Image (spheres, grey):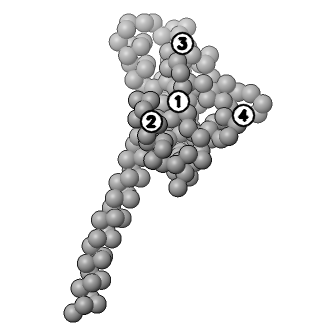
Amino acid sequence: MTIGEICNREVVIAERNMDVPEAARLMRQHHVGTLVIVDEAEGGRRPVGIVTDRDIAIEVVAAGVKPDGLTVGDIMAGELATVRESEGIFETIRYMRGRGVRRVPVVDNGGWLVGIVTLDDLLELLAEELGEMAGLISRGRQHEAATRK
């Protein structure tokens, strides 16, 4: 299974010049804690950064910075980690761990945004898979008991 098969393709985006209060309103409106910052070009969206609700809390509110005139481009993380949609799930988890990130935009072979995957998404998938494996153990015992009386 590839990361492109499980990623969320409904990504809430913003451009670098969006002001921070508008970004916070956008997060609230869509009930998300992350905006993928994009540059629009050639009819596509190329991810260039991420801004989280934590970035706003730490970089703006806790630092006592006035948000007026401050853009998401001013506070977004510098080097963006992305993963190709053809990447495997385990490789994506390993990459995220190595980079120390909890979310990554998913891109196609041209580097255009196609989705996002988060630690929460991966934990949910793994929990479901573990549940299926646990059910297999139980089902195997039931099958053996029924066939070997």
Q: Quadrant of residue 49?
A: top right
Q: Quadrant of residue 65?
A: top left
**Residue 83 can be seen in this image:** yes
Q: How far across and down, in percent of the image, does residue 36 sit?
A: 55, 29
Q: Distance between the residues labelled 2 and 3?
A: 24 Å
Task: Give the number of the disc on residue 104.
Answer: none
Q: In this view, does 56 lie above or below 10?
A: above
Q: For mark 4, what is the residue? A: 44
Q: Which residue is drawn at 34% across and 59% down?
A: 130
Q: Distance between the residues labelled 2 and 4?
A: 25 Å
Mark in front: 2 vs 3: 2
Q: Is residue 8 above or below residue 69?
A: below
Q: Do the residues labelled 1 and 2 touch (CB within 8 Å)?
A: yes
Q: Distance between the residues labelled 1 and 2?
A: 8 Å
Q: Which residue lies furthest to the left in this view?
A: 149
Q: For mark 2, what is the residue? A: 96
Q: For mark 3, what is the residue? A: 74
Q: Residue furthest bottom?
A: 149
Q: How far across and down, in percent of the image, does residue 70 sit?
A: 53, 10
Mark in front: 1 vs 3: 1
| Secondary element at tag 4 | strand
Task: Give the number of the disc on residue 81.
Answer: 1
Q: What residue type is labelled 1?
A: Ala
